[in-house]
Image (tube, helix red, strand yellow):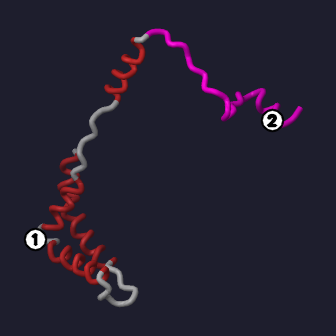
């Protein structure tokens, strides 16, 4: 007894080239019922407010200077005027820390 025949005695074998078997249709009402069930299962997911809150925080008085500094750095590096191997990671971290600090209380208050 080969190893494959041993395993196939326990587990069904499916061949990729085999044609698909179609189940006989019992009634025409079934697909409509399935569609209704799928619609009920698909609940509308609430809109994600995080990006909106983050944009508002970046424009707030507290974070505006850090956001401007990061954008200026990005423009400078992308135009080729920055130092060799310069990136704006430090500026980004400062800006993101400020925005996340501003966003967190508002976001978690709306999630309750």
Residue contact at pointers 2 and 1, CB within 8 angstroms: no
Q: Which residue is mark 1?
A: 61
Residue at image point 29% right, 83% down = 79
Q: Is residue 87 left or right of residue 12?
A: left
Q: In terms of depth relative to the viewer, which is nearer, 71 or 97? A: 71
Residue at image point 60% right, 22% down = 21
Q: How many marks?
A: 2
Q: Secondary structure at mark 2?
A: helix
Locate residue 71, reporting x and y percent. Answer: 23, 76
Residue at image point 20% right, 73% down = 67
Q: Which mark is residue 100?
A: none
Please tell me how crowded label 1 is: few (under 14), some (14-19), or many (20+) other residues with Cα within 10 Å. few
Outermost residue toward the right? 1
* Most common secondary structure along the magenta stretch: loop
Q: Looking at the rendering, which quadrant does residue 39 occupy?
A: top left
Q: Is residue 82 left or right of residue 106?
A: right
Q: Which mark is residue 4?
A: 2
Please tell me how crowded label 2 is: few (under 14), some (14-19), or many (20+) other residues with Cα within 10 Å. few
Locate residue 12, reporting x and y percent. Answer: 70, 28
Q: Which residues are magenta?
A: 1-27
């Amino acid at each position: 007894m080969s190893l494959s025949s041993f395993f196939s005695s326990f587990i069904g074998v499916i061949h990729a080239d085999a044609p698909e078997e179609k189940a006989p249709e019992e009634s025409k009402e079934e697909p409509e019922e399935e569609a209704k069930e799928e619609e009920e299962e698909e609940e509308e997911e609430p809109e994600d407010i995080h990006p909106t809150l983050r944009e508002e925080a970046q424009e707030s008085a507290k974070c505006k200077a850090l956001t401007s500094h990061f954008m200026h750095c990005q423009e400078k590096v992308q135009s080729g005027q920055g130092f060799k191997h310069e990136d704006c990671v430090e500026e980004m971290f400062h800006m993101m820390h400020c925005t996340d600090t501003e966003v967190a209380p508002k976001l978690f208050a709306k999630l309750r």
